Structures are given as structure tokens and as C-alpha cells.
Image (cartoon, rainbow, N blue to C red):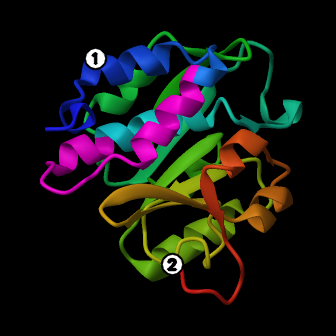
Amino acid sequence: MPIVRSMPYQLMKYCAKNVRNTRLVIVFLLLLSHLPLQAQPPTLEYQLKAVFLFNFTQFVDWPATSFDSEQSPLVIGILGENPFGSYLEETVSGEKVNKHAVAVRYCKNEEEAKSCHLLFINLPDTKKRKQAIEAFKGKNILTVSDASGFSGEGGMIRFFTRNNKINLQINLEASKASELVFSSKLLRLADIFKPGENH
């Protein structure tokens, strides 16, 4: 059995804790993006996606004005049902991004979510999801989901599965409208969304 198939959570945690080593993070993201999902429980899939969410904070720049102060936390929010269990909180525990502590917030509605910097949108209802994306349009919020059609709806990063492997699709136009800057290292790992294509 390939070693990545049985990769323990502690290894994922180690890699997440050592994000200051850019080369390690890139290798780890590449490893995760090619990790087969077949025959794995959904909880492991979302463990991997939780680590992705944290690592996105290393490769996206937010405007300084999106923080109330230098001490304000960088907030990763979840809107809708939480698919990560405790893994996301465990992954970001004790971490900082440019001196900002990383916090996790569970949002009941769009108003609560407006204070987040990165938001995982887990709303299966297409109409509600589109309304949420529209509510965050132009704000400094990195929107992420694994919902089909998310990029075409104006979301910024979509997880999708190809050949039983996690892949990323990025909507650059949506990110520019929110004044978020993606690292070229992250862009190399992703498919770039083009309006009109199958998404």
C-alpha cells in the first residue's frame, strides 16, 4: 500500500506546523493534491481539505485594511454544516500568519461570516450559496467550497475530484474584485477558471 494512502494525521499536522519552510509546503500541497481518495473515509478527505485551508493562508495576501489591528486574528470561517469535525481547529492551533493568530469561527449566517478572512461555504442549496457569494462580493474574504459550479457562481477556490484525487480551481477575477493576491506558487497547483467552461 502506498505510504501516502496511510499517511497519519500527525504527519499532516507536522507539515502544517512547518509552513515557514516554503519548499516543504509546496511539496506537501502537491502530495495532497495527488492523494487518492478512493476507499478512504470522508473524514480523511476533510482532514486533507482542512490542511489545505490553513495552507491557503500562506499563499494569499489580504489588504492590511482587512484587519482591525496588527493583533487582530486571521479568521477562517465555516458557513453551513461543519464537515471538518475538530481537525481544522487542531490544524490552526497556535499558528500565526504575518503576526496574526489564526482563529476558526462557525457562522450561522452571512452577517456573522462578513468578519472572516477565509470562508468555507458548505451550503448545498444552490440559491442560498449564490446569495452568500453575492453578499461577500467585493469584500476581502477568500471564499472556498467543494460545491459543483462554485467557480461559475463567483466563488474563488473550489475543491474538486479528478481521477479520485483532490484538485483546485481558482477564479482569479473574483479574487481581484476582493483585492486578494494569490501567490504564483498556489496558482501553479490549480486550474484557472475560465467563464463558459464546464465547471
Marks 2 and 1: CB-CB under 8 Å? no
Q: Is residue 86 left or right of residue 160?
A: left
Q: Residue 27: say if magenta.
A: yes
Residue 194 shows which numbered tag? none
- Name the residue at 60% across, 38% down: 56
- Name the residue at 23% across, 31% down: 3
Q: Which one is in front, 25 or 51?
A: 25
Q: Which amino acid, by three-letter code, is at mark 1?
A: Gln
Report helix, strand or loop for mark 1.
helix
The residues bearing labels 2 and 1 have C-alpha atoms spaced at a distance of: 33 Å
Q: Residue 21: say if magenta.
A: no
Magenta residues, as a range? 24-46
* Residue 186 seen anywhere in this rendered image of the structure: yes
Q: Which one is in front, 111 or 74?
A: 74
Report helix, strand or loop for mark 2.
loop
10 shown above or below 49 = above
**Of callouts 2 and 1, which one flags the residue occurring earlier in the amino acid sequence?**
1
In terms of image quadrants, where is residue 123?
bottom left
Q: Which amino acid, by three-letter code, is at mark 2?
A: Gly
Residue 10 shows which numbered tag? 1
| The C terminus: image quadrant | bottom right
What main secondary structure does the magenta stretch of the protein show?
Answer: helix
Q: Residue furthest bottom?
A: 196
113 shown above or below 13 = below
